[in-house]
Amino acid sequence: MTVSADPDPTVVAVVLAGGTGSRLYPASRSDRPKQFLPLPGEPSLLERTVSRARTVADRVVVLTRESYAAGVRERVPDATVLVEPAGRDTGPALLYATHRIARACAAAVAAALPSDHLVAEGLAPAIRRGVAVDPATRRLVTF
């Protein structure tokens, strides 16, 4: 989401970490969501996503539910944790996060990154290209 047409916007990675991961039961349950699991190996999917986000973003915000906030802070203590007021799935979560980001930083581009995906090489250059397109066109860039 573009907030300003600044040619060098602040890039904020919004890491989505609120889902329960019910499709990976029994490994993932409400008390142990899939983003906290080290699949495959170490570190957790959340930690890997935040690490990837840091290669392209000026700031990293992890959006989660209240019951996961402490677990997020434990795994990525230097990321900003934003708690959803209510769980309403991905669209409303992103709207809430980008609204909060826009209030804090008028010249921002948000990059939404699900915390429970395993991503290979090549994402960072693609995000950089998308960020370059965004301020010039004021369009939504999706991958």
Image (cartoon, rainbow, N blue to C red):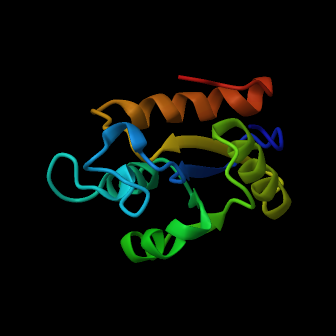
Task: Give the quadrant of residue 129.
Answer: top right
Looking at the picture, tell me which residue is in the foreground, 111 or 131.
111
Residue 92 place in picture, x, y as percent? 74, 42
Residue 40 appears at what percent x and percent y? 17, 46
Which quadrant does the N terminus fall into? top right
125 left or right of 138 in image:
left
Give the vertical position of 12 relative to 94 (above or below).
below
Residue 100 falls in image quadrant = bottom right
Residue 114 visible in the picture: yes
Q: Residue at x 60, y 61 (%)?
A: 65
Residue 46, image x, y percentages: 38, 55
Q: Position of residue 50 (x, y in %)?
A: 42, 56
Q: Is residue 46 visible?
A: no
Q: Is residue 38 left or right of residue 52?
A: left
Picture residue at 50% right of the left edge, 53% below the top: 17
Residue 12 vertical position relative to residue 72 in the rendered view, above or below: above
Query: Image point 27% across, 47% down: which residue?
Result: 26
Front-lying residue, 62 or 128: 62
Residues 67 and 112: in front is 67
